Image: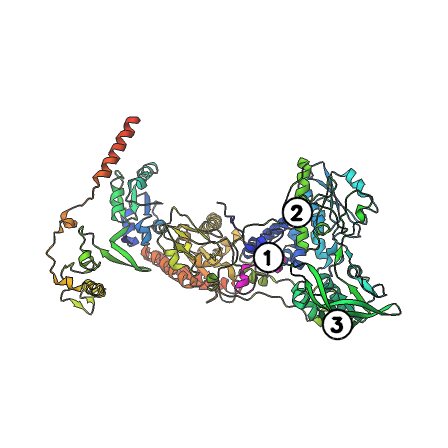
């Protein structure tokens, strides 16, 4: 059955590349980190980068937001990357060249390399031209290393290049090689040159010595050749680049660093977490000020004169700052850095006939992505304007589709700039009330004064236990219960048992997808077996059992214990990796279930049909279950299963219900040892009765 | 609905232990709703019987099926074929007694055993509790008794109650059983119709109840139409 939801989880919908973050979390919980990496790389070849610096719109839209805090999806992504390093190297390799056409890509940033990746994977020859020494674009040259270590970026780039893409660095199109030559030699050309220039300001004194532009400063810092900044640095601008400059300045020894911007504190365009980290590192903010003049002495900057900004945007939301000239202030500075915006460097178009618009921007059709010249496309910030890394990746994917279509058909493919998918939307308030709160796993970071001592990465990744704990918080949106209406007898059992008040019965039962929490309690008790779960249904338990027990037939251990264990209690992969030999040597066949509360009585009896001596159910620690009432309901079902065994002359003691103590790794082995001894006793007693 | 309860598994094992291939058939109607014989109970009983056979070292196949309702010809018409084709030599029905009868009439020389005890016509009082509310006596007197049935809910089925065994609203047979007549009186008080109980209800004719022998309901009009349709089908064929 196709279990793909007609409406998607909001996290997937919010992601510009539609990463299936919900499924990613499920893979983490199951211990399938490698499959999770495959899934991530399929959606986004810059997965390592996004695990570090993505602005994570997935988290902003996470439905857990309204319960307590969103799931730490970006950190989980980083965890997956860090847990699968060797696997990633093994999966790396060339794509098969199946098409004779070649595509030239100008710019080795996230947009250009994503397009290169996609086109190489569908069999085209791809050559990427990069003017800098190294690939990566802005990610490599301007994002400070404390946010994104270069080797992390290289993980993604090396994967992409290994597809067989030719990279020509230090090759400036429009300088070393004219664009017309690319147009001649390649069937299609993609301009992905980004916004690599900083804008300047037209205020008196701007030419003073000591006034610098943000991107050249950041580039010099990343090359390890920072300009002398002095002790007092003023950064003009309130966006992410301004924050990067300010934080770098603190690391370079400037004691007094102030960011000043037109916007009020709550209007600042930089990501909030970036601003907070800057404040922790001792960066000062002077908000709602605009520069009136750069002050200088003998041509050398001494400070900035400011005027009060009373409004940044007009009523229509357009950028249109208004000032109160009577209110002024000033800041002293040894260096002033301008971080007020970026512009495209279009020297690559030199001597070509590609049109540039009246405001100096590349002319381009946002739907077909084509420029004024046939066969020359554009993507990424050079055409879309400034955006986040993942948005550049999304645009790279789109460009690859446009180019593939062009090379396949000679025509242009119309695509909307942003594909909107249907979503299940927010959690209804009534459902929120029933969901248990669980604190988000936050990683601690060193104090600000320690961080500014150098450029080492600020944030650490999750440990495995932290990643697994955070993954458990996922509400598993869209994977809940669904009803086979032909079987449903409208008996109301689901309505009576649903701890979230979700199930309803009209002519037949229904569990609205936007409300269902996928606990599985209804499916466990439905007398008509009409309720199933999209995620981890009864058939999955059956499959796991027969696979595990098939091995056992070959050489039977003295006593066989089938242990249904709560997946949520594992802090490592120790018990998740399936090893058929384990069943032989330990006599324990483990079936990991995302909440054993979903086990039905038939699930509990099935192992005995296949020769199990004991069913050992291990639930979470007392009171820890994510799902209200599940613990009591499970207890009642265990009692029912025991009664059934007794009715056919087997000891009910053959079914055991344990509560995890501390963690799976700490307590489960001991439970199985107790079960093993107990079952030996029961076996000999029952054999005694028979004789 | 018809309320039933699974028989003890030990008893069921005795029914079927001499048979090589047994088909357990659940019912998707009342037996499902009263949690006694639906798809899930069929799985449970099937599983238990296989475990019992394994324990006893008995070579026995136990198969499972569940039909929409065992009391409709269309829903059970596939069963005899399956019994024949799959060499089933005993059937265990998890329907009410109606289903067992219905299957038995259609299963040739293969025995059909009851997996449930059929209890009564009743309703769900609360999750897990079902109570009898109708005795199926064939001649309703509910209009005389405020909608509460004296036949089903009075232990003696008396029509002019209560008797002397009514004690604090409970029946003398058990403190767990409400006195049906107490319920009737309270209900009629609420309706303002208590005065109607002054009239003595005459001894009634019980021939409409099971005492009158097996009963049937016939809608001649529908029967006639169905017969005509059959005839037409036969001639056009």
Asked if residue A396 shows in the view, the reply is yes
Does residue A60 belong to the magenta stretch?
A: yes
The vertical placement of A237 against A112, above or below, is below
Pointers 2 and 1 within a single chain: yes
Q: Nearer the viewer, residue A289 or A285?
A: A289
Residue hosting label 1: A58
Q: Where residue B158 appears, x then y in whole percent?
A: 14, 59
Q: Earlier in the sequence, mark 3 or mark 2?
A: 3
Which residue appears at 27% of the width and 42% of the height?
Answer: B103
Q: Vertically, is A448 above or below A15?
A: below
Q: Which mark is residue A409?
A: none
Number of on-image labels: 3
The Cα atoms of the two marked residues, 3 and 1, are separated by: 44 Å
Under circle 1, the secondary element is helix
- Mark 1 is surrounded, within 10 Å at the Cα level, by few (under 14), some (14 to 19) or many (20 or more) other residues, namely many
Q: Nearer the viewer, mark 3 or mark 2?
A: 3
Q: Position of residue A650 (x, y in %)?
A: 35, 56
Specify whether B26 is left or right of A424: left
Name the residue rendered at 70%, 61% in the picture: A320
Q: Nearer the viewer, residue B44 or A307?
A: A307
Q: Give the label on residue A397, or none.
A: 2
Q: Residues within 10 Å of mark 3 (few under 14, many from 20)?
A: few
Chain under disc 2 = A
Q: Which residue is mark 3?
A: A326
Reading the chain from its start, which is encountered first: label 2 or label 1? 1
Q: Left or right: A184 with respect to B230?
A: right
**Main SS type for the magenta part?**
helix
- Magenta residues span A58-77
Give the mark nearer the N terminus: 3 vs 1: 1
């Amino acid at each position: 059955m196709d279990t793909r939801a007609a409406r998607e989880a909001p996290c997937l919908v919010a992601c510009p590349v539609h990463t299936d973050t919900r499924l990613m979390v499920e893979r983490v919980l199951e211990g399938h980190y490698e499959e999770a990496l495959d899934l991530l790389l399929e959606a986004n070849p810059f997965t390592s980068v996004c695990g570090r610096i993505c602005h994570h719109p997935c988290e902003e839209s996470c439905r857990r937001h309204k319960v307590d805090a969103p799931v730490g999806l970006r950190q989980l992504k980083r965890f997956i990357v860090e847990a699968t390093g060797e696997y990633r190297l093994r999966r790396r390799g060339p794509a098969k060249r199946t098409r004779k056409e070649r595509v030239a890509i100008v710019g080795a940033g996230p947009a250009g390399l994503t397009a290169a990746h996609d086109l190489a994977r569908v069999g085209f020859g791809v050559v990427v031209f990069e003017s800098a020494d190294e690939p990566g674009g802005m990610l490599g040259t301007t994002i400070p290393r404390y946010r994104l270590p270069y080797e992390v970026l290289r993980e993604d780039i090396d994967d992409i290049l290994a597809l067989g893409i030719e990279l020509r660095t230090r090759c400036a199109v429009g300088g070393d090689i004219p664009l017309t030559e690319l147009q001649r030699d390649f069937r299609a050309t993609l301009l992905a040159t980004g916004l690599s220039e900083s804008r300047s300001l037209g205020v008196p004194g701007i030419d003073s010595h000591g006034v610098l532009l943000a991107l050249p400063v950041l580039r010099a810092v990343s090359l390890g050749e920072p300009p002398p900044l002095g002790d007092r640095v003023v950064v003009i601008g309130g966006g992410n680049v301004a924050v990067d400059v300010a934080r770098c300045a603190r690391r370079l020894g400037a004691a007094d660093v102030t960011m000043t911007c037109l916007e009020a504190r709550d209007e600042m365009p930089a990501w909030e977490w970036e601003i907070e980290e800057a404040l922790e590192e001792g960066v000062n903010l002077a908000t709602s000020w605009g520069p009136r003049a750069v002050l200088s002495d003998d041509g050398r900057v001494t400070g900035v004169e400011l005027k009060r900004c009373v409004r940044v945007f007009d009523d229509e939301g357009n950028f249109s700052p208004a000032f109160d000239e009577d209110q002024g202030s000033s800041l002293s500075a040894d260096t002033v850095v301008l971080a007020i915006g970026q512009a495209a460097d279009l020297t690559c178009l030199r001597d070509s006939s590609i049109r540039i618009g009246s405001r100096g921007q590349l002319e381009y059709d946002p739907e077909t992505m084509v420029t004024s010249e046939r066969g020359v496309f554009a993507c990424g910030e050079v055409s879309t304007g400034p955006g986040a890394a993942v948005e550049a990746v999304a645009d790279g994917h789109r460009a690859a589709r446009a180019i593939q279509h062009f090379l396949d058909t000679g025509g242009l493919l119309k695509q909307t700039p942003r594909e909107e998918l249907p979503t299940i939307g927010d959690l209804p308030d009534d459902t929120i009330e029933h969901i248990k709160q669980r604190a988000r796993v936050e990683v601690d970071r060193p104090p600000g004064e320690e961080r500014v001592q150098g450029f080492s990465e600020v944030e650490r990744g999750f440990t495995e236990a932290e990643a697994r704990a955070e993954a458990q918080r996922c509400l598993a949106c869209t994977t809940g219960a669904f009803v086979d209406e032909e079987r449903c007898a409208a008996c109301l059992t689901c309505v009576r048992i649903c701890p979230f008040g979700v199930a309803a019965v009209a002519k037949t039962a229904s569990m609205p997808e936007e409300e269902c929490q996928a606990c599985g309690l209804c499916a466990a008790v439905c007398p008509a077996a009409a309720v199933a779960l999209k995620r981890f249904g009864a058939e999955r338990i059956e499959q796991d059992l027969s696979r595990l027990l098939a091995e056992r037939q070959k050489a039977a251990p003295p006593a066989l214990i089938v242990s249904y264990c709560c997946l949520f209690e594992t802090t490592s992969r120790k018990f998740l990796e399936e090893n058929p030999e384990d069943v032989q040597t330990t006599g324990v066949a483990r079936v990991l279930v995302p909440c054993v509360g979903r086990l039905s009585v038939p699930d509990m009896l099935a192992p005995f049909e296949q020769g199990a001596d004991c069913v050992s159910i291990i639930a979470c620690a007392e009171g820890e279950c994510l799902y209200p009432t599940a613990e009591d309901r499970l207890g009642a079902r265990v009692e029912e299963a025991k009664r059934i065994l007794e009715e056919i002359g087997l000891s009910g003691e053959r079914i055991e219900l344990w509560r995890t103590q501390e963690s799976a790794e700490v307590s489960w082995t001991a439970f199985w040892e107790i079960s093993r001894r107990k079952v030996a006793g029961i076996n000999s007693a029952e054999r005694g009765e028979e004789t | 609905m018809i309320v039933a309860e699974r028989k003890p598994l030990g008893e069921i094992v005795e029914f079927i232990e001499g048979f090589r291939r047994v088909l357990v058939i659940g019912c998707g109607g009342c037996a499902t709703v009263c949690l006694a014989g639906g798809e899930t109970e069929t799985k449970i009983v099937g599983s238990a019987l296989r475990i019992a056979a394994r324990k006893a070292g008995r070579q026995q196949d136990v198969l499972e099926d569940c039909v929409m309702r065992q009391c409709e010809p269309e829903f059970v018409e596939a069963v005899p074929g399956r019994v024949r084709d799959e060499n089933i030599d005993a059937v265990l029905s998890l329907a009410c007694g109606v289903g067992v009868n219905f299957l038995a009439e259609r299963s040739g020389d293969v025995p059909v055993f009851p997996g449930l005890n059929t209890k009564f016509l009743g309703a769900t009082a609360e999750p897990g509790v079902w109570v009898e509310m109708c005795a199926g006596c064939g001649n309703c007197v509910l209009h005389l008794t405020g909608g509460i049935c004296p036949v089903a809910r009075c232990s003696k089925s008396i029509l002019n109650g209560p008797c002397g065994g009514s004690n604090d609203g409970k029946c003398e047979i058990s403190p767990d059983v409400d006195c049906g007549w107490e319920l009737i009186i309270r209900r009629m008080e609420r309706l303002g119709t208590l005065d109607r109980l002054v009239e003595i209800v005459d001894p009634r004719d019980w021939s409409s109840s099971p005492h009158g022998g097996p009963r049937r309901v016939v809608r001649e009009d529908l029967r006639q139409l169905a017969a005509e349709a059959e005839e037409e089908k036969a001639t056009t064929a």
